[in-house]
Image (cartoon, rainbow, N blue to C red):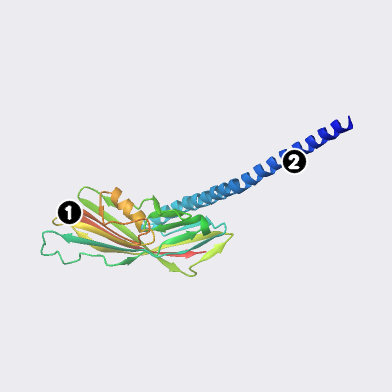
Amino acid sequence: MPLQGDSRGVSDVLGFVLVFGLVVASVGTVYAFGVGELRDARDYERVNNAERAFEVFADNVDDVARRGAPSRGTELKLADSTLGYGETTVNVSLDATPATPAANANNSTGAVSLSPVVMTLGDAGEVRYATGAVLRTDGDGPPRMVHEPDFVFDEDRVVVQLVRSVPQGTTQVGGERIARIRTVETSRTTLLTRTDASVTLRFNVSSPYAPAWGDYFESEGFSCDAYTDSSTEVSCSLDDVSRVSVVRATVQTAFE
């Protein structure tokens, strides 16, 4: 009987050890894979929140640049992120074919520097505002446009307003705080206008988000030179445009 009892005791101990080992292994597996997924979900939601805030900012800038509001303020929760400025250059040009007497006059805007407002959320991604558009990246993913600019591309008419941001005061804020972006319009200038024979309209964009701009222009019927997700320049054209108006609205932006 004592031997039988000892065997049963050893069996119980072995069973406990096996069950305990399975529990530990399961917890380790959940921790290894579950924590990573939770972190990814948290980062994705952080970028989503920034995107929503930038859509409000885009509407407020539009109030100033297009609708004549004297100024607007937009609050953004930084949540361990950084608010600053990036680089984007746009050149809009016209090519008249066949050539017209005015073909070489006023046929390009020149390089317009937009100074987009950018929120960087560490490894989670980035969100930026550039001339009415809101763009984002998630981690190492490709850039994409989530809010389109108010450009008009009709069958024979194009109306484009390029919004140029001019930073005032400090050019970067960060940490855990509520930041405020104050926007004030300073000027409007007509850069390009054409109402005569049909022309080819071309956009040249230089930006880390060039692929997103290429995708946008192609969705509007443009033909673009080949580009990849890592391209920093894109060139897209639209044929048979009869009426063109390109205006630059300059706004001052200040971080408070």
Does any portion of residue 156 appear in the rendered image?
yes
The residue singled out by tag 1 in the image is 242
Q: Nearer the viewer, residue 68 or 15?
A: 15
Q: Nearer the viewer, residue 237 or 84?
A: 237
The residue most toward the right is 2
Image quadrant where residue 128 sits: bottom left
Horizontally, residue 49 falls left or right of residue 4, namely: left
Residue found 35% across the figure and 58% down from its top: 210
If the image is split into quadrants, where does the N terminus sit? top right
**Residue 72 at what x, y percent from top left?**
45, 58
Against 12, residue 256 (above or below) is below
- Disc 1 residue type (three-letter): Ser
**Residue 173 at what x, y percent from top left?**
53, 65
Quick one: SS at disc 1? loop
Residue found 86% across the figure and 33% down from its top: 3
Q: Nearer the viewer, residue 25 or 256?
A: 25
Quick one: SS at disc 2? helix
The residue singled out by tag 2 in the image is 17
Q: Which comes sooner in the sequence, label 1 or label 2? A: 2
**Residue 149 at what x, y percent from top left?**
35, 53
Real-space CA distance between mark 1 and mark 2, rounded to the nearest whole angstrom: 81 Å
Horizontally, residue 35 falls left or right of residue 10, namely: left
- Disc 2 residue type (three-letter): Val
